[in-house]
């Protein structure tokens, strides 16, 4: 039977592993990333929101770590629009009582295609995000004439990860890579060892952009999920396992 290798944070991977187990799908948790809040003494001041403006959450982690400090301001700012990069982020906001709009295409390009961010008069925008990451969204909104503040509330950490145990699984593997950064680290770990042959395994990614990156990094079989949510991943993997004789 095929085994799914889950590479997100420990908590996210354990949650998805339980869902997969409920569907009769074997998995192994191999976290390639961890997320930590930025300490208060290192964090920039919470940005002010503008009436009629936008607040964009760039990930579910941005909601987890940023919303507690922004919730009062969101509640008290008239006509503020809240945007989520994709369904998983939107669901995390809704679970906290915040209605949010998410694009069909779950990435910066999808956000930039939304009518409210393509208008002739650009709203003042706060982007809630992690340290680093892509600059496309902020850069393009500024180019369109918007006033943009970026506020980082968490950072990505990269724990040590040894790919050697993957050899001992002794069965076909499917890898999960829910972001471009995780995909790059996964690819480096496999390509930099005698396990380069594992790049011939399927890898499930959340967007066309990450799918293109996977092809560039040498993956032979790239499956594009509808988004980064757990359900999106399940929807992508079930037909594939059925075709491979594991469903």
Image (cartoon, rainbow, N blue to C red):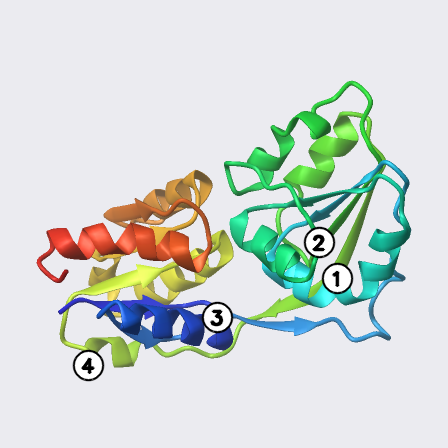
Circle 2 sits on which residue?
98
Circle 4 sits on which residue?
168
Image marks 2 and 3: residues in contact by CB distance under 8 Å: no
Q: Distance between the residues labelled 4 and 1?
A: 42 Å
**Quadrant where the N terminus lies?**
bottom left
The reply, left or right, for residue 240 in relation to residue 74 is: left
Q: How far apart are marks 1 and 2 (CA)?
A: 10 Å
Image marks 3 and 4: residues in contact by CB distance under 8 Å: no
* Residue 47 visible: no
Residue 2: name its quadrant: bottom left
Image marks 1 and 2: residues in contact by CB distance under 8 Å: yes
Residue 122 in picture, x, y percent from top left: 80, 27
Q: How far apart are marks 2 and 3 (CA)?
A: 21 Å
Q: How far apart are marks 3 and 4 (CA)?
A: 24 Å
The circle on residue 55 is: none
Q: In this view, does 222 lie above or below 16?
A: above
Circle 1 sits on which residue?
67
Residue 120: name its quadrant: top right
Q: How far apart are marks 3 and 1 (CA)?
A: 19 Å
Image marks 3 and 1: residues in contact by CB distance under 8 Å: no
The furthest residue to the front? 97
The reply, left or right, for residue 197 in relation to residue 45 is: left
Mark 4 or mark 1: name the one nearer the start of the chain: 1
Mark 1 or mark 2: name the one nearer the start of the chain: 1
The reply, left or right, for residue 134 in relation to residue 185 is: right
Q: Under tag 4, what secondary structure?
A: loop
Circle 3 sits on which residue?
12
**Given this view, does label 1 or label 2 mark the residue nearer the observer?**
2
């Amino acid at each position: 039977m095929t085994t799914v290798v889950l590479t997100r944070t420990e908590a996210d991977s354990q949650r998805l592993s339980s869902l997969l187990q409920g569907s009769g799908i074997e998995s192994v948790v191999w976290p390639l990333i961890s997320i930590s809040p930025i300490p208060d003494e290192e964090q920039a001041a919470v940005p002010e929101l503008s009436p009629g403006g936008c607040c964009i959450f760039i990930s579910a982690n941005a909601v987890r770590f940023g919303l507690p400090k922004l919730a009062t301001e969101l509640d008290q700012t008239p006509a503020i629009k809240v945007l989520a990069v994709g369904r998983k982020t939107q669901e995390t906001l809704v679970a906290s009582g915040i209605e949010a709009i998410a694009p069909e295409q779950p990435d910066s390009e999808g956000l930039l295609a939304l009518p409210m961010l393509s208008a002739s008069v650009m709203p003042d925008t706060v982007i809630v995000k992690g340290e680093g990451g892509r600059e496309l969204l902020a850069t393009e909104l500024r180019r369109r004439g918007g006033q943009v503040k970026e506020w980082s509330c968490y950072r990505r950490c990269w724990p040590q990860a040894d790919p050697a145990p993957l050899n001992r699984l002794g069965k076909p593997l499917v890898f999960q890579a829910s972001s471009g950064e995780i995909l790059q680290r996964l690819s480096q770990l496999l390509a930099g060892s005698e396990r380069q042959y594992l790049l011939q395994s399927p890898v499930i990614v959340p967007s066309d952009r990450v799918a293109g990156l996977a092809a560039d990094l040498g993956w032979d079989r790239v499956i594009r999920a509808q988004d980064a949510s757990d359900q999106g991943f399940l929807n992508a993997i079930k037909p594939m396992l059925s075709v491979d004789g594991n469903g």
